[in-house]
Amino acid sequence: MKQIGIISGKGGTGKTVITAGFASLAKDAVFADCDVDAADLHLLLKPEIIERHKFKSGKVAEIDKKFCQRCGKCLSVCRFSAITEDFVVDPISCEGCCFCSYVCPAGAIRMEEKICGEWFISNTRFGKLIHARLGVAEENSGKLVSLVREKAKQIAEKENCSLIIIDGSPGIGCPVIASLSGLDYAIVVVEPTLSGLHDADRVIKVAKHFGVSVKLIINKFNLNTEVTERIENYCQINNIPIIGKIKFDESVVKAMVEGKTIIEYQDTEAKREVTKIWYRLEEEIT
Amino acid sequence: MVISVASGKGGTGKTTIAVNLALSLPSAQLLDCDVEEPNSHIFIKPQITEKVKAFVLVPQIDKEKCNFCGKCAEVCAYKAIAVIKNKDVLVFKELCHSCGACSFFCPQGAIKEVEREIGVIEIGRKNDLEFVGGRLNIGEAISPPLISQVKAHINSGKNVIIDVPPGTSCPVIEAVKGSDFCILVTEPTPFGLNDLALAVEMLRKLKIPFGVIINRSELGDNKVDEFCRQKKLPILMQIPFKKEIAVAYSKGIPLIEGFPEYREKFKILYYKIKELVK
């Protein structure tokens, strides 16, 4: 079984639109939305949820007023400023380290298991989708990404699917690192802007750091042909294959507004290019 | 006043708003807290006068003193320490959250906390604009400690603008908390709306007042407008989609330089925010 992940460093370069495009063309694939923080793939794939699970991870301190002697030990050890002067825990700042509960002489601090989000297994018109929703203002996104990927793998094995396609998140931190591990290819979607190139370079370095090979797609390439050329030079120097260049196309937004993938929308240049990229990629993977 | 610029979805124009608002105000301070993918410097082109390394504390174990009792591993909530009975102690530094419990509880006094570099903070200026930006090292997973160290440079005598990373999870919380006001930047598309709703939920939880800027307006549908009206969220500004704006952005040209009429609009934006905070 192969796994490919679509990432970008910078947000809003077209990861999800391209992932959804691939999803409409792939046969025998399972899809995983690993942008658990701001998941959007479901808006195009319109999943029918068949399983729904709570994501429990980490802990949060709770001080029982009845037993608290207001001695201040907890306050003095907490490095996350999560306990107020009135001995109330701010659950958003609490990192769940348990330090306070260990030092409390009155045994007044309990560590509660935290529900940080939900994850789902769904049917879509293109195949199974594993997706999740990290609770707002929650942590442990990397763990939730790993969980989503583990479930996707189990389902792909069970259903004899040869491929997992992963929609990644922006940035280079924990959810991205969790999305990258063990990929056969990371597909980096870049737009021809100085920020886009700057950010792609950083995420490519992260991928290389973790030993994942990278391929690149330039999206909206005609927006600035000079920067597109710089990206092409960058790829040549760094030995990164460019597997496609997609034109800026307003129909991408129109398709999104209709809840369709660009493949399902009318015949456009973007659609033809994504189709071409997919078939080339598919041939190489399998 | 501290104004943070956030958005659920990436690529909606946070940096554009943060940079241009900062450039439109007299002697402001801009903090780039998108430490995973910092971009503000591309537009500001600040003269960097100081680079400070950013560290977190991690345990270092003195194996001469350690008797492998296992207390450190027992108290570590992140499984960052493993003790092989009577033999060895392993520290997984990337998993450590620097809570300090292990060194506190070690009965042998064998654990010292030492600094581990996770990134760098660049300090500089462009004319009368102060600039502070964080940059996370490649391969580092945890950005909030770096974000909080960038924020330690806040100059409270000035108007401070914070460029926030995308999303709604821990790095975003770290970047926006303590702000007097937060601008949520979105675009009028289903993705923009979905992620705006998440960001609104986050700010309500943090009890930070906020307003919305719709970027690339006229490009998608009017559902974001409807959402804001329904939820009574102030729409502070709309920037219509123009290919010329996108091209200027791609070259690293600030909006107010490419399109000087926006200078006034950003000033008005600031006054609107001042009214709302009052």
Image: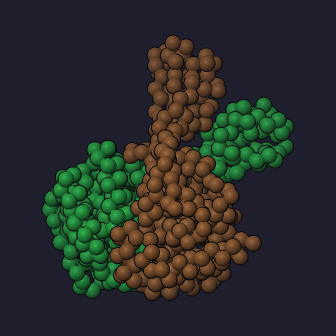
Image vertical order of residue A233 relative to residue A114, above or below:
below
Q: Can residue A134 be seen in the rendering of this structure? A: no
Q: Residue A75 is drawn in which quadrant?
A: top right
Q: Nearer the viewer, residue B246 or B29?
A: B29
Q: Residue B103 is drawn in which quadrant?
A: top right
Q: Looking at the image, which residue sits at the far top?
A: B64
Q: Which chain is brown?
A: B
In percent of the image, x 53 and y 78: which residue is there? B263
Query: Residue A204 vs residue B137: left or right?
Result: left
Q: How many callouts does the rendering have?
A: 0
Visual colour scheme = by chain
Quarter of the rendering occupied by the C terminus of chain B: bottom right
Image position, residue B61 (x, y; %)? 52, 22
Image position, residue B272 (x, y; %)? 66, 78
In percent of the image, x 64 and y 71: which residue is there? B210
In percent of the image, x 51 and y 12: which residue is there? B64
Q: Which chain is green?
A: A
Q: Nearer the viewer, residue B230 or B61?
A: B61
Image vertical order of residue A267 relative to residue A133, above or below:
below
Quarter of the rendering occupied by the N terminus of chain B: bottom right
Q: Looking at the image, which residue sits at the far front?
A: B127
Q: Residue A285 is drawn in which quadrant?
A: bottom left
